[in-house]
Amino acid sequence: MLNARDILETITMIQDEHLDVRTITMGISLLDCCHSDIDVMCGKVYDKITRYAKDLVKTGEQIEKELGIPIINKRISVTPAAMILASCEDKDAVKLAKTLDKAAIACGVNFLGGFSALVQKGFGPGDRELIEAIPEALSVTERVCSSVNIGSTKTGINMDAVALMGKVVKKSAELTADRDCIGPAKLVVFCNAPEDNPFMAGAFHGAGEPDCVINVGVSGPGVVRAALTKAGDCDLTAVADLIKKTAFKITRMGQLVASEASRRLGVPFGIVDLSLAPTPAIGDSVAHILEEMGLECCGCHGTTAALALLNDAVKKGGVMASSHVGGLSGAFIPVTEDAGMIDAARCGCLTLNKLEAMTAVCSVGLDMINIPGDTPAEVISAIIADEAAIGMVNSKTTAVRVIPAIGKQVGEELSFGGLLGSGPVMPLSTYSPAKFIARGGRIPAPMQSLKN
């Protein structure tokens, strides 16, 4: 039985090293809200979300106060909206997005994820309508986040969906250009999307999940860096062992919070996602962990190897601390959300090509990267295709969240504020993949029996 004694040794981590629970996310199934009338369905959606999540924020604040553990976000994830939109005769996806936003505001949560579609093998009823509505939906809502899964190891990559998503990302930036292009910062394109991810913008409540569940995401890059600083000049075997032990302590704290939230809300406990999620705050950076290992600057040669060590050690330590580890779990590398990544991108050491290599060994993919505002849609699609290929072949989750900075060029900056941070516009190759993207069809699933 977990109790407050289990986290006594983390007090210094909380006070001095930015240790926190990044999010408590309540997953809610909306499958029983399906109705042929969009207005009736939206009413059922609003009622169910507000009924289940009415005490989520209050409960999180009580746990935070009683245990002294910072809980930064309280969030909701719902069934992929395209699945319930399929039942409607009038598939007004924007109306559904507004309903989700209204429910999120009523519950007081920071974000609601699940304005999503799963099209890795093709478009079903409601999928295309939802995807085409994403730019408008993200421009007229405040707290709704969106994701689209366009590939998987078992199905291959839906290149028709990839081509469409390049246009969607670009249009989403254009519609929110007056707000630093915030639209695509709330949009993730996945390969192998997990069904229990508590982190935004990619959270949704999978079809195989319970009717309602509590998932928790922890975060502690600053704790890991501080432990390495104290360890001094040890070899990499000792570094890995130290990270494992630190990840264990971080995950035990997340397990305690998840269990408490589950008990108080009367909702099943789902998973702890033990990802190291950075922030723009100094001392809370994954890049700084890599530099503490001995790299002069994140992005130099050796970065991918250091990140592989970190990611593996975090997973090994975390799974010992909780019997329900899930989501993404590892190390995130969102450029604008990580103080060290921001500095490395500004000085030119961290490039898009290096980031792509790093995604082969980290938790997710090309995340929160500002690109020139005049980038053609087919180039964005090609970035998505490259990243999906890494995920498909390596049987891991990869994702793309890039922000076309409308009206800005390489070296200029976008600032989103809060956890989304800020960062420079990064350069891309100017050679065109347009003919490749225009071919459409599907990239077949890889041969797994001859893994090499």
Image: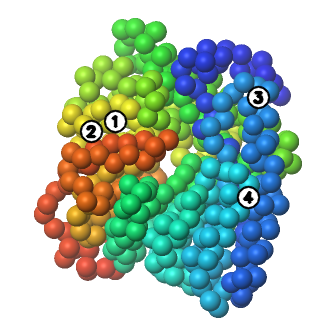
Sooner in the amino-acid sequence: mark 4 or mark 1? 4
Residues tagged 1 and 2 counted as in contact (Cβ below 8 A): yes
Q: Nearer the viewer, residue 262 or 234?
A: 262
Q: Is residue 121 visible?
A: yes
Q: Closer to the camera: disc 3 or disc 2? A: 3
Sooner in the amino-acid sequence: mark 4 or mark 3? 3
Give the secondary structure at mark 3.
helix
Residue at horizontal 50 percent and vertical 37 percent from the top: 277
Residues tagged 1 and 3 counted as in contact (Cβ below 8 A): no
Q: Which residue is mark 4?
A: 106
Real-space Cα separation, disc 1 to disc 3, in angstroms: 32 Å
Corner quadrant of residue 300:
top left
Give the secondary structure at mark 4.
helix
Q: Which residue is mark 2?
A: 345
Q: Closer to the camera: disc 4 or disc 2? A: 4
- The type of residue carrying mark 3 is Lys
Real-space Cα separation, disc 4 to disc 1, in angstroms: 35 Å
Real-space Cα separation, disc 4 to disc 2, in angstroms: 38 Å
- The type of residue carrying mark 2 is Ala
Give the secondary structure at mark 2.
helix
Q: Which residue is mark 3?
A: 65
Residues tagged 4 and 3 counted as in contact (Cβ below 8 A): no
Please provide percent x and percent y for residue 20: 61, 30
